[in-house]
Structure formats: C-alpha cells, structure tokens
Image (cartoon, rainbow, N blue to C red):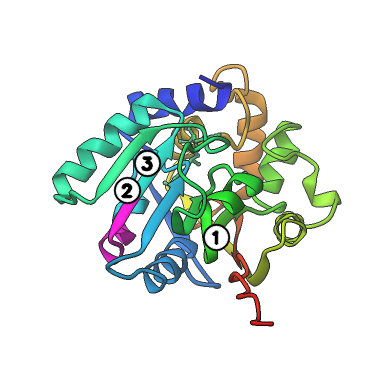
Amino acid sequence: MTMDAEFYSRVAERFGGYFSDARSTDVFPDGRPDTAFDELATALGTPHARLLDVGCADGRSLLRVAPAYGAVTGMDLSPSMLECAERYRAEAGLSHVTFSLCDAADTGLPDGYADVVTSRRGPLIVREIERVLRPGGVVMYMGIGEQDARELKETFGRGQDFDSWKGTPLSERIAQELSDEGFVVTRNQAFRFEEFYHSPEDLDTFLHQVPIVDNYDSAADKEAFDRYVAAVSVEQGVRLSRHWFIVRAQKPAAVEPSPS
Ligand SMILES: C[S@@+](CC[C@H](N)C(=O)[O-])C[C@H]1O[C@@H](n2cnc3c(N)ncnc32)[C@H](O)[C@@H]1O
C-alpha cells in the first residue's frame, strides 16, 4: 500500500468510511460541489453506459450516481475503504456495482471500456483514463483548489499542495494536462465555500480525517492549532475556507475514414 492508501485505511477504520462526525455548518455561495458533480455525472448515464470511478474510497458518492448507469466499477487502493464500500453497496441493493482493489494507474480494464470516468478528489492518471475511455467518452474530476484551507496551512507552515497558491491555478494545470493528452475541456468550474466548525474539537476531529495538514497530531500541533482557532473563530464557529473545482473533458470521437 502507498502512504496515501495507508492514511485512508486508518480513516476508514476509525470513522467507518470517508466521513467523520465532526460537526460544522457549511455555507455554499457557489452551490455544493458534490451536488453539482452528482448532477453532471447522472446526466451522462444511460442504462447501457459503463462508469469507472477511481479513488472511490467508501463508495458512498459513487453509489449516489450509480443508478443512472448499466455497469459501475469503483477502484481504490485502500482495502479498508473498499470493505466499507461493499457494505454500503449491499445496503443500497445495487448489484450492478462492483468494487476492486486496484491502482488507478493500471486499471486492467480493456481499451475503450468505459463511457465515463470519474474521480472525486482521487487520483487523475490522464494517460490511463484516455486509454480506458471509449472515443467520445467523458472524464470528470473534482479537485481541491490552490486556495483550499490556505490560512490554516499558512498557520501550520505545511499542508496539502503547500504554496500552490503562488503558481498557476490547479484547475488550469489539470485542464492543460487533459488538453495535452488530446481531450477537449468542456467545463472548469470553481467552488468557494466556508465551513464553520461548531467547536475546536470538531475541527480537530476533521483534521484527523483529511490529508489537509500532513501527519496532523493534536498534541504536537497544539500551538499552531490554537493560534488558528483564535484567529478565525466567529459567531458561527471556527471558520475553514474551502476551494474545490470540477473539470470535465471529452475524448474526441473516432473519425470515420472517408470513402475514397
Ligand atoms: C479523498 S479520497 C476520495 C473520496 C471519494 N472519491 C469520495 O468522493 O468520497 C481519495 C481516495 O483515493 C484513493 N487513491 C489514492 N491514490 C490511488 C490510486 N493510485 N489508485 C486508486 N485509488 C487511489 C485513496 O485510497 C482514497 O480512498
């Protein structure tokens, strides 16, 4: 297992999946990114379409859109996350969904297998996605933007994609990577939103569940944590400013050779 998968396995074992019980009130001026992603992914589904989701974690996001498709595969590198996913799948009674312990870099699926590939804050291995999508197929990616939790990371002096706010926006880098591989980018949408944690303990729980601050340790990081809480606490709670984005792109359809 990679370090990443080990982290997510610990989260699954501690919280029973990818979501913790940290309490927060969230404010979405640009709409909810997960809802937008669900709507876009559902709209691409048909009873015969095949969906591949890479980095599916506990599968709950995937199971929301699965009914729109004929066959659905979720892949992840964390066995503990996939155990949770299989439990949620059985509860939902969705027999056309399968989960597989597999690296998104080498899915083992045939060329042109999938109509749609999705990744929500999971891996984006563009070359493998291009191979596994049929001509005309669509990839949708939900990523974490360069401004995500920036004030928190600056207070800690470390964090996921630290300093990325100084360079080209991450969504533009992804869009460029997809274009370079021959995709046509059809959407690039930013979502800024605020989470207000009901108490410092709730924020502390949340930081154990996500890789925003690498190797977050309540005791070792107490000084930075307290400084952050003092700086951002308002009436609604302890503020965490988020920045996510959705990029969608299409693999060009095969061009029929013209009869000569
Ligand atoms: C942020 S979580 C994804 C959350 C999930 N997509 C959702 O919407 O709830 C990232 C997941 O990607 C998985 N992952 C990371 N690298 C991977 C890879 N190369 N292949 C497959 N899964 C990977 C991790 O194990 C983790 O479960």
Closer mark to the observer between disc 3 and disc 2: 2
- Which residue type carries mark 1? Val
Q: Position of residue 116 (x, y in %)?
A: 46, 60
Q: Going by the picture, which residue comes out furthest to the front? A: 260
Q: Nearer the viewer, mark 3 or mark 1?
A: 1
Identify residue type, mark 2.
Arg
Q: Is mark 3 within 8 Å of ligand 1?
A: yes
SS at badge 1: strand
Residue found 22% across the figure and 42% down from its top = 88
Q: Is residue 205 above or below residue 43?
A: above
Q: Is residue 237 visible?
A: no
- Observer-side mark, 2 or 1, equals 1
Q: Is residue 98 visible?
A: yes
Residue of label 1: 139
Above or below residue 191? Residue 122 is: above
Which of 129 and 120 lies nearest the eye of the viewer?
A: 129
Q: Tell me which corner region of the image, top left, top right, bottom left or bottom right, holds residue 17.
A: top left
Whether residues under marks 3 and 2 lie with C-beta atoms below 8 angstroms apart, the answer is yes
| Nearer to me, 92 or 137 | 137
Give the distance between the C-alpha atoms of the residues marked 3 and 1, in whole angstroms: 25 Å
The residue tagged 3 is 19
- Point out the tag, 3 or 1, that comes first from the N-terminus: 3
SS class, disc 2: helix
Report which residue position mark 2 lands on: 60
